[in-house]
Amino acid sequence: MKFVFDPDDLEILQGIVEESSEHLNGIEEGILKLEAEFDSEQLDAVFRAMHSVKGVAAFLDLIPIKDTAHSLESFMTDMKKGLYPVTSEITDILLKGVDILQLQIRQLGEHVKKLEVNPPREKFELHIKKHGFQEFVQEAGVIRNNTLESRENGREESCDSKIQLECEWPEPVANVMKIEISSFREQLLQDFFEETSEHLDTIEKNCVELERQPEDLERLNAILRGFHSIKGAAGVINSMQEEETPDDPFQKIKNLSHVAESLLQTFRNQQLPLSSPVIDIILEAVDRTAALSQMVQGMESEDLPIEDLLTRINALSDVDKEANQSIISSPVENIPRQFKAFVNITNQALESMENIIASAREDVPISRKRVKQYLRALNSIASSSRYLEYEDVQVLIASHTQFFNDLVPGEDLVNPELIEEMKSHHGQIKKLLGDKVADIKDLLSNVPIEYGEKRIGEILVAQQKLSQEELNEALAQQKKIGEILIDRGKVTTKDVERALLEQQLAREKSKETPEPARASGDIGGQSIRVSQDKMNRLMNMIGELLISKNRVFHLAGKIGLEYELPGLAREVKDIASEVARISDELQDAIMSARMIPLRVLFQRYPRTIRDISRKAGKSVDLVVLGEETELDKTVIEAINDPLVHMLRNAVDHGIEAPDKREAQGKPRQGKIYLKARYQGNSVIIEISDDGKGMNPEEIKLKALGKGLIRPEQIESMSNEEAYQLIFLPGFSTREEVSELSGRGVGMDVVKNNIEQVGGTVTMSSQLNQGTKFLLRIPLSMSIIRGLMVKMGSQSFILPLDSIEETVKLPAHKIRSYKKIKIADIRDEIVHLIYLKDLLGLKEDLDEPEVTSARRIPIVVINFDGNRFGLVVDSFQHEQEFVVKTLAEELAALKIYTGASIMGDGSVVLILNPVQLYQLFLLLDHGG
């Protein structure tokens, strides 16, 4: 449709896009909540959203948006008056309307975005796609009227006065669509991949929880919403394909999501709990959908069939295969526009009848509620048939309605004869409706394509229903040609309606309009998506800004000391301080944008535990705490594999078999705890179990058998040191190789991956009580706060979160014990490590001689209970440092986690205190 606007209207259009997007945000969830449990406040919220969208659209008379929102608002008004409850049929039509609104707002936003680049100074035109809103308004009106009729004890009102066939049908949408679709489609694809991944994660998490709590209706609704959203988004992408093929991945995703949604709806409608086989197949659908999405992105190259999975899902729905098919086998898109509402309404009614038949149980009283639902479905079909004047369908429905009116709910029992009669009724109606659609399709194939370009009068003349002279005479009057010819008795109403139908059929034949579906993402909402590459670039730029800030401070000091210009030095320092303030705020903002909650990672793991425990024949419950803790997105991606491996080990190695646990007096179901919490500038992730624990003697013998240690080391090795052996390459406690473990590739890789992000991993265990792993992960890999120390002529950086304190002790308080140096710091004995000796640094000739009076600088390091003092020559200063990755040769030296560039351009290495301590032990400085 074409709209003409003044230049000042651009600001109003911007407001319409922004406000409508905000009102529609979360509206689907609100509608589904209303269906699950009626709530007047929720109804008011949905009503206000629809009313607001209609109101802002009315400012510029945007008819497609205004009329669509008005149709949805009408349902809300009726429900506020208590005229009828929220049914699955109403929910479906509401969600469909929201899909259309979202797509309308999305494409209007694309127009506005283009106009903002070069704002118009004169009147401008916008060509807005209709997205089938007229057909939706018609369909919504029929459903609303049918619902009102059923609430008025079957009192019939003809819909003919409310729904009129227009003589002039709209042009095909493609002829008025004048926006560039390629960039729009690319954005939709990006949103589709991201949102599908999020929906699949949510579905997976809720499936596992639903298996534990089968009565949790809210989780079932959340799963349904996820599949509905994926189906809608895939439908949008699929409708933009130049050519539709059955092997199209988006069509497969749409089909798979649809059957999964239908299966879940069947269980919800019948109020049946989801069994483990159903959960299994839903999770399989999640995996297949994820694989199809990856295939489109080029991450999977092999074609993925879904036919076997579709068959198994349909089989689980416990409804006859014939009943699962709609009244037409071809897509709805192949049916003319004015019949789409008829097909959709009758299909929904047939599906409702199928569910009632499938849930029928013998030898129980007939449910009054079920009878009303069945009669409502029959009435819906009858009303739609009256609109199209299908008298034979109306007669058939009337006979079936009479049959049900003769039943006495609450007294008559459900018996095999009644179920068979219902199945017979359903089959008869379905066959008759299928024949009607087949007739329409046959008519479509035989209609001359040139009828699409002809007017109604020309078609009637071509069919010899009218002469050319009679047509010319009628055209001279200022009325619609169809009305004139009917008033004069030249043709009948049916002749005009058939000509209208054939005209539209011809237009449909030449160009088919894609089905409206849910638009992915919001335009003008409160949040935007930013690519990972852009975030990384911003992070690199803020890093460079911090280096430049430090250089300005260094320059200020140089001006004051070397050039003896204190006034200029103070001025430069003032400017540097202002730059520092701005850069610090910018850094905080960017760091905050990169931080995401661990929930996005942790919500995957209930599925992992479920699958592994089933394979291992164990019963395991995963308890997750602290999932709101946030980490840098890059760090979260890096720690996923280590966490999965440790959780697999906890199930396979830690948790015992149910019978064995019971014999030991433990609950049959084992528990694994996954916890996260902040500690300084790090996040602590704890993985623990209540399983059998680790036997240190068994670990020693396994390590000895694999040649990882020498026999003489066993006697002097403590239990804590024995536990560290599991981190050696090639170590495994499994005798045989299984699907889950025993390959000798594991904890060493976990440790390496954690250390690559600057983290550490430690463990403790108690026999028959369980094992605990602690992962210390830095909040960010890009910027750290540290203390610079000097050793000889070189400087080094120590991360601040590993430093307990700094002290300066008189030299005479440092004493020797065996081969090590120790000191008494705050009434505790701390052994000392000389950084100079550990790194093999040369003696500094300018270093002052150590006397008993000289005070020795010591950095007290504390990590996971290990406390030691690092002896340095001097403390320099504390600040934030930008972490730069090391070259491959230096990165192999684990005592360094990275490097930083100073204000004077020099490069300073960042030390890893944990690895320094490990190196100290390895060199046997501890005896």
Image: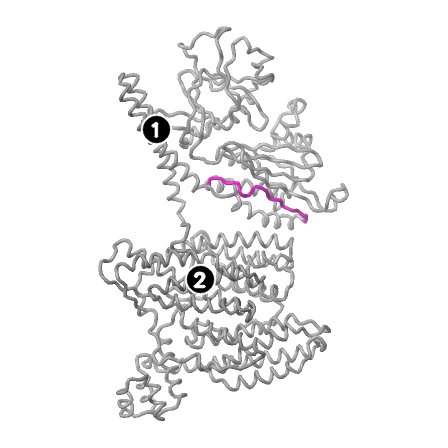
* In magenta segment, residue 882: no
Q: Position of residue 443 (x, y in %)?
A: 42, 82
Examine the rendered structure and indicate whether residue 696 appears above or below residue 179. Answer: above
First-in-chain label (2 vs 1):
2
Q: Is the Cβ of the residue at disc 2 closer than 8 Å to that at disc 1?
A: no
Q: Is residue 417 left or right of residue 91?
A: right
Q: Measured from the top left, where is residue 921 in percent x and y?
A: 56, 22
Q: Secondary structure at mark 2?
A: loop
Residue 252 visible? The answer is: no
Which residue lies under the disc numbered 2? 518
Residue drawn where x is 50% and y is 76% of the image: 145
Mark identifier at residue 62: none
Magenta-colored span:
617-632
**Residue situated in front as seen by the camera: 339 or 443:** 339
Note whether 873 is above or below 319 in the view shown: above
Q: How many marks?
A: 2
Q: Secondary structure at mark 1?
A: helix
Residue 8 visible in the displayed image:
yes
Question: Which residue is disc 1 drawn over?
Answer: 577
Q: Is residue 618 magenta?
A: yes
Are there few (<14), some (14-19), or many (20+) residues within 10 Å of tag 1? Answer: some
Residue type at mark 2: give it: Arg
Q: Amino acid at mark 1?
A: Ser
In the rendering, at what x and y percent does residue 839 appear?
A: 47, 20
